[in-house]
Image (cartoon, helix red, strand yellow):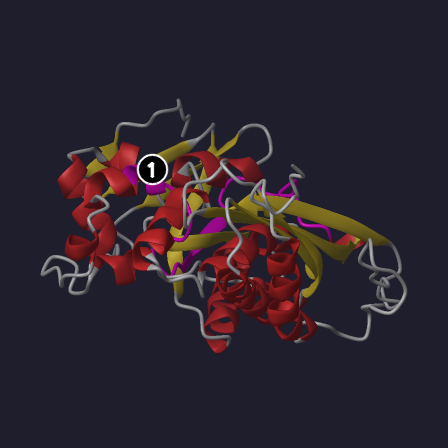
Amino acid sequence: MAISYKDSGVDVERGYQAVKLMKEHVQSTYNQNVLGDIGSFGGFYELPKDIKNPVLVSGTDGVGTKLKYAFIADKHDTIGIDAVAMCVNDIVCQGAKPLFFLDYFATGRLSPETVATVVSGVAEGCRQSGAALIGGETAEMPGFYSDGEYDIAGFAVGVVDKKKVINGSKIKKGDVLIGIKSSGIHSNGYSLVRKLFGEDKATLETYDERLGAKPIDVLLTPTKIYVNSILSLIEKVKVKGIAHITGGGFIENIPRIFPEGIGCEIDITSYEVPTVFKVMQQIAGIDDYQIYNTFNMGIGMVVCVAPKDVEETISQLTSTGEECCVIGKTIKGKGVVLKKKNGFVAPLYPVEK
C-alpha cells in the first residue's frame, strides 16, 4: 500500500492555502527597495543609495514562552509584532535603520488561518518599524509540537553609515541615562510569569483587582517598537549608547553598552513602576535585584547622552510620543547599582564610585 506525504501528517495543500492567505499582509510591507520579481528561493533587497559607507547590522530572536498565553487565549494577531520588535529594537540600538525581516513559523499541523493571523502581526510589526517582510519559512512538523501549538522566530537586517554607528565607546563617567517607557512585560521572563499567573484559562480571563485588568490582556500586550522614535532622536542628538532592556533586565543589558571601567547608578524611584511588575514581585517574594535582573520593569529602552543633551533628548522623545525620564548616571566601576531614597540596594556586581 502506498503511503503519501499527506499520510505522514504533512499536507502541502494547507501550505499553499497559508501562503495565499498571508500574501496580502506580506506585500503591505514592501517598499521601493524590494525586488520581488527577481527570484523565488531568496528575498531580494536593494541597499539604499544615499549611505556613503553602509554597514549591515543583523539580529535574530523569538518570542519565547509568551506563546503559551497566545495558545491559551487562542489569540494570534499580536504575537508576530513581538517577534519583529525583539529583532528591530536590537539593531536600532546600533543606530541602524531596519531594512528587511524574515520569519520562521513551525507547527505540528498547519492551520492556514492561524499562520496567516500570526503573519498579519509580523506584517504590522514590519510596518511599524519600516522593515520589508521579504521572506520566511512555514514548517509543518507532525508529532513535534502539541496540537494547536507553534513557534515563531525572526531575523532582521538594518543599515547604518559606518561613521554613525552607535557602540557606547564614547561613554564616560557623568553621562546621563534616560529610560523610555515600555508597553508592559514585552517578551522576556515569561517562564517566571507563567509560574506566577499560571495557565488556567478561566482565571486568566477573569478581571484581577490587583492588575486593574484581565491578566491575559496584560500578558499578551505586544512589545513596543522603538525604531521610529530612536531614528528620529539620533538625527537630532549625539546619542552615545542605547540599551534594549530584554532578558536579564537592567542588570545585564545596561552594562553591555559601557566601555571598560564604567558602571552606572540607577534610581529606581525616578519613575512609576507599572502595576504588573509590582504584583509579580509581591507574588514571587523576590528582592529588587532579582526582579530588575529579570524584567524591564517598565523601561524598554535606555539611551545614554552627555548632560548637556538631556533636555533636548527628552524633548525629542516626547515629541515622537514616548514617555521618558532620567533614571540614572554613569560612574567609574562595573555593573549596576540600584538606588533608592533610603540608600542603595546591595549590588550583584562590585561597583566603584
Residue receiving disc 1: 191
Dominant secondary structure of the residues highlighted in magenta in the image: loop
| Horizontal arrangement in the rendering, residue 102 relative to residue 307 (left or right) | right
Any magenta on residue 61? no
Point out the residue furthest to the top here: 350
Q: Quadrant of the C terminus?
A: top left
Residue extent of the magenta highlight = 165-192
Does residue 231 sit above or below 170 in this rendering? below
Q: From the top left corner, tell me how far across and down residue 225 is, in percent.
A: 51, 62
Q: Does residue 162 appear in the picture of this structure? A: no
Task: Classify 312 as above or below 83.
Answer: below
- Return the residue nearer the eye: 298 or 70: 70
Which corner quadrant of the image does residue 51 belong to?
bottom right
Q: Identify which residue is drawn at 58% across, 63% down.
A: 227
> Picture coordinates of residue 14 (x, y %)?
60, 59
In the image, residue 188 lies in the stretch drawn in magenta: yes
| Residue at 72% across, 56% down | 158
Q: Position of residue 27 (x, y in %)?
A: 69, 73
Expressed as whole percent of the image width and height from the top left, the position of residue 55 reads 81, 50
Q: Secondary structure at mark 1?
A: helix
